[in-house]
Amino acid sequence: MAAARGALAWPSELSPDSTVVLRSGHAMPVLGLGTWRSDKAALKHAVTHALSAGYRHIDCAIMYANEDVVGEGLAEALAGGVVSRASLFVATKIMPTQMHPGLVRPALEASLKRLRLGYVDLVYLHWPLRFVAAPSAFPVPPAERLGYDAAAVAETWAQLEACVDAGLVRSLGVSNFTCAKVAALEAAARLPVSVNQLELHPALAQRRVVEWHAARGIVVAGYSPLGSPARPPAFRHGDAEPAPLAAPAVAELAARHGRTPAQVLLRWALQRGTAPLPKSVTPARLDENLGALARGWALSAEDMEQIDGLDEGYRFSRGEDKTVPGQHWSELWADDDALPAAAVAASDAAA
Ligand code: A2P
């Protein structure tokens, strides 16, 4: 595999235009706009507002079923000269139903059409798990879920590599992959894994997982960086769930720094070398969230530790709607949960 090796070169000084160079050699803005479950009626304006405010990274997915609206916003901003294509970073994700021979390029071409772009900057495999190509229903019934198959992942990746060769995408990534699944893919891949997008917030800090990727130069992008406060009932697991945005430790830091709780959570993510992807369709919140990257403030090492103390390994997005019959959702993440510090160090030495 021709991956660039070495530790992640994360920017030491953060500013609204901070980027990180991916293993592909292309730069990615370190904070992006998430679009999962974005209200379609508000999304176009959210995109144009975000781009005017200074966002340069939009995180999409075919599964979110709203790329057409993102595309309208992108087209308007590009036509109006608000942003140039070269300064923009747009990502999308291949669905588990599309992880079959011959399906990837047509899926990406259809996505590009909806996004009104000639290429995207990054394509992720949305999950390491496959579904049948034409499910009878969504959510996909258990009998039509095919689970994890390293050979199927590698075959899909090879189709993505061909899309890079064809100029349809510049960098490749994965999402919801454990370290072991990333390692298995890399052993079979020609082009490097540039990014792994994972659920990340103080209640699920995944410290060893983040370190494992950083040692290899793989960027970890974080979804639900605010703790996904408006997630739907299907993603709730009782009434006593952690709420990082409302945590007293975060409120205390926000007051001390004259910032908001959301800015503190995002700054923590950025200063630990991860790329948060906060979702919002609210203009004032879009501005607020970008303020995490403002110059002139930073969390101290003690502040960072105060937030580190909120980690309880709590997963909101468990993947129970993607498991095969008889499989418990925890099996999807078990390799990482079992990742001992010694294993991280040992595999760092080998990297
Ligand atoms: P909205 O889109 O209505 O503004 P996450 O990225 O962790 O999944 O969180 C996204 C959720 O958090 C959305 O419901 C979003 O609401 C809300 N949100 C986004 N930014 C902020 C903020 N700065 N303060 C409070 N809630 C926010």
Image (spheres, rainbow, N blue to C red):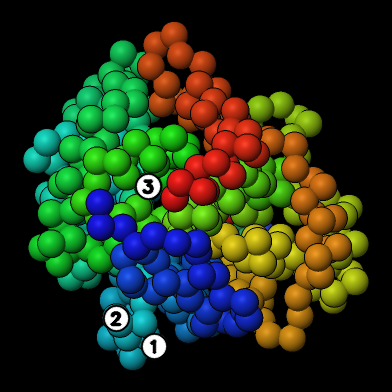
Residue 172 appears in the picture as rendered: no
Query: Which residue is nearer to you in this view: 343 or 199?
Result: 343
| Marks 2 and 3, how far apart at CA | 23 Å
Q: Secondary structure at mark 3?
A: strand
Instruction: Between residue 288 and residue 343, name the one nearer to us.
Output: 343
Secondary element at image label 1: loop
Between 67 and 206, the one nearer to me in the picture: 206
Residue at 89% across, 53% down: 248
**Taking 14 as reference, is 348 left or right?**
left
Disc 3 crowd rating (10 Å Cα; few below 14, some 14-19, many 20+) is many
Mark toward the start of the polypeptide (1 vs 3): 1
Of marks 1 and 2, the one in the foreground: 2
State whether residue 287 is above or below residue 183.
Answer: below
Compared with residue 179, is residue 107 higher up or lower down, i.e. above or below?
A: below
Disc marking residue 85: 2
Q: Which mark is residue 82?
A: 1
At mark 2, the secondary structure is helix
Residue 121 appears in the figure: yes
Mark 2 vs mark 3: which is more N-terminal?
2
In the image, residue 341 lies at what x, y percent? 65, 39
Q: Residue furthest bottom?
A: 81
From the viewer's perspective, is 211 left or right of 38?
right
- Image coordinates of residue 178 in percent, x first then y, are 47, 37
What residue sits right under mark 3 in the picture?
174
Q: Quadrant of residue 77?
A: bottom left
Badge 3 amino acid = Val
